[in-house]
Image: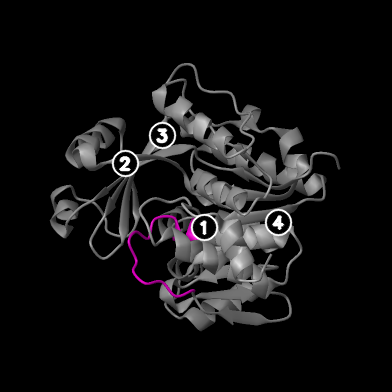
Amino acid sequence: MSNELDVVGVGNAIVDVIASVQEGFLVEHEIRKGGMTLVDQMEANTLAKAFGPEGRRIPGGSGANTIAGIASFSGTTGYIGKVAQDALGKFFRKEMERHFIEFPTEPLDEGPGTARCMIAVTPDGERSMSTFLGASTEFAESDVDEELIRRGKILYLEGYLFDKEPAKKAFVKAAEVARSADRKVSLTLSDSFCVDRHRASFRHLINGHVDLLFANEAELLSLYETDNFEAAIKELRKDAYAAAITRSSKGSVVVTPSEVITMPAEPVKKVIDATGAGDQYAAGFLFGYARNRRMRDCAKLGHIAAAEVISHYGPRPETSYRQLAVKAGLL
């Protein structure tokens, strides 16, 4: 197919605002540490004021971060997500285009503003997110660019989007378009918050509709309602064709029809900000998967990307992933 892309992502289009805070800040503002909590626009504005001039504005959204990471490997990418016709929306679009990511979705003319995620980073490197979903929740079936999806070798679906009914329908439509075009479908569970809300739907999708699943350990345990990792992996092998489960400093576990592969994490001198670690692991893995690399190599690329992103503030790479992969002898 002409103009074929490695990966096309579908997810929330969000601008991240990141600030370093002390533990007491989380208590004062009733922020759940290490997770994601939905807030309204007024609460988001309150946090922005509390962050003050320390807040850094960075284009984000879990799926969009992954797509940007794939682009850093020199992968070819596209993204589908909704922003408003406002300053933040224009900022998001400009940044996507700057990295040669195709972003054709029409902006929202009326309604809520562009989504934003207020990320509080504590001294231990953990990130706690307060998210105003704004215009991203107006994403609907009419926004699904079927031509763009057909051009992608892999469709990457962000679990965070699987919430409001119109967005859920768009999510399912995108998967159906990809399957009908004989493309691979990949899903990230995004957060245990999402799993708790949509456990049955996610398990239905995973069983027979998803070629590659991404999750972290907490999300996997929530999915199968157990506190035993090995038991959860056993259940996962019954449902999923292939999966990559991240376990923070323990590395990752890759599940295939024939084996379970344990891969170590890349060494990091100091964790500065864990924001985007899972997103960038997915970026490396998906890039390798799109290029028909061995599963072990896919996971290695994922860990290289994750190690880079947690070494600085922000959810997107500051060093070329392609250069790091070449240095590691993987490209």
Rounded to the nearest angstrom, the CA distance separating label 2 from label 3 is 15 Å
Mark sitting earlier along the chain (2/4): 2
Between residues 16 and 190, which one lies in front from this camera angle? 16
User: Residue 282: x and y, percent?
Assistant: 57, 59
Q: Is residue 283 left or right of residue 270?
A: right
- Report crowding for label 1: few under 14, some 14 to 19, many 20 or more residues within 10 A (C-alpha): many
Q: Which residues are magenta?
A: 266-279
Rounded to the nearest angstrom, the CA distance separating label 4 from label 1 is 23 Å
Residue that appears at 55% across and 47% down: 68
Residue that appears at 55% across and 35% down: 98
Front position among marks 3 and 1: 1
Q: Amino acid at mark 3?
A: Ala
Mark sitting earlier along the chain (4/1): 4
- Magenta region, mostly helix, strand or loop? loop
Residue that appears at 77% across and 41% down: 151
Q: Are marks 2 and 3 in contact (CB under 8 Å)?
A: no
Q: Is residue 126 above or below residue 56?
A: below
Q: Residue furthest top?
A: 110
Between residues 84 and 73, which one lies in front from this camera angle? 73
Residue tagged 1: 280
Residue tagged 3: 115
Q: Is residue 232 left or right of residue 294?
A: left
Q: Assign the C terminus to one quadrant of the image.
A: bottom right
Q: Assign the N terminus to one quadrant of the image.
A: top right
Residue tagged 4: 209
Q: Of the numbered discs in the image, which one, if any, rests on residue 56? A: 2
Front position among marks 4 and 1: 1
Residue that appears at 53% across and 23% down: 107
Q: Are marks 4 and 1 in contact (CB under 8 Å)?
A: no
Mark sitting earlier along the chain (2/3): 2
Q: Identify the element where label 1 is drawn.
A: helix
